[in-house]
Image (spheres, rainbow, N blue to C red):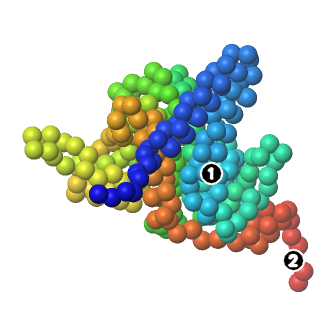
Amino acid sequence: MSELNRINLSAFLGDDAQLLVRAREEANRIHGSGDIRAAGNQVEVRARDIFGRRLPARYRIAHGHAIDYRGFVSPQTDIIVADAFNTAPLFQADDGTEYVPYESVFALGEVKSTYYKRDRALEKAITTIRDVRTGLFRASTRRNPLFYFLLFVDSGNLALQDVSDLYNATPLEDLPNIVCWLDQGTLLYARLGTNGLGESMPINYLLSPLADHDPKEDHSWAMIQWGSAERIKGSNLAAHLGFLAQHMESCVLKPPNLQRFMMLLTCEKYLLLR
């Protein structure tokens, strides 16, 4: 009989999930006092701390804007996962807001305390994705697709039929790669197969739907719950971090040309001498 001990790894992520739950409760109390900005920061700051501790050191967690060498910037983003070794922010404000070269960005994400349909968080994410996809430039390859995610601590008044209607009316390229509700599951794009009863079921998830989509096969967005009911929040958080890590491990990012950034962002005018 082996004398090796076994630890429950899911319990560690469960503790992290509870930190987010407590941050949400704190945010609700602060929001009730009228300080809306501080309330929103509670969950975002806690999430960035967790991401920073759980992801490998080669990834850096920031918040702010992605910026391309022409000076175009993304909307404000709660979480930017960037290359920690090959670049530093071009600018960092006193509140920690960073402007990160787009070439160095692995993923962009939003963290929300509670899902409320009236807040239109998914619709706003779709607009952000479209703006970044069409407005920011970096060398486009299969190995560094735009990856955008949302993380909700509480599902609030989530109705999957509403989400289904929105997704069916939106081009695939403008939808988030993954959306996680800690108390419900993860919404992701999946290849479908059939079980023994002939019913459709997800058999393989696609983190980059545009790159991995095979038009010959059947696909659908699917809500998948991870773990048991007792450990659902920790399991869903673990899955979310795992998907993010899987995406980043498959990416190949080129270091930004900082000389080009500095020259083009600072040059106002020029005069040719002939």
The answer to which of 200 and 22 lies nearer the viewer is: 22
In the image, farthest residue toward the left: 197
Q: Position of residue 201 (x, y in %)?
A: 22, 43
Q: Residue at x 40, y 51 (%)?
A: 6
Left or right, 86 with respect to 161, comes to right
Where does the C terminus fall, quadrant-wise? bottom right
Left or right, 36 with respect to 114, comes to right
Q: Residue at x 49, y 49 (%)?
A: 241
In the image, farthest residue toward the bottom: 274
* Amino acid bearing label 1: Gly
Residue 129 seen in the current view: yes
Q: Position of residue 69 (x, y in %)?
A: 70, 63
Q: Residue at x 68, y 50 (%)?
A: 62
Where does the N terminus fall, quadrant-wise? bottom left
Q: Secondary structure at mark 1?
A: helix
| Count of marks placed on residues | 2
Q: Secondary structure at mark 2?
A: loop
What whole-number distance in Å separates the C-alpha atoms at marks 2 and 1? 48 Å
Residue 210 seen in the current view: no
Above-or-below relation of 101 to 258: above
Q: Which circle marks residue 52 in the picture?
A: 1
Crowding at label 1, few (<14), some or many (≥20) Cα neighbours within 10 Å? some
Q: Which residue is mark 2?
A: 272
* Amino acid bearing label 2: Leu
Left or right, 75 with respect to 163, comes to right
Give yes or no for contact between labels 2 and 1 (Cβ–Cβ under 8 Å).
no
Quarter of image, res 26: top right
Q: Position of residue 215 (x, y in %)?
A: 27, 56
Above-or-below relation of 109 to 152: below
Q: Nearer the viewer, mark 2 or mark 1?
A: 1
Left or right, 97 with respect to 104, comes to right
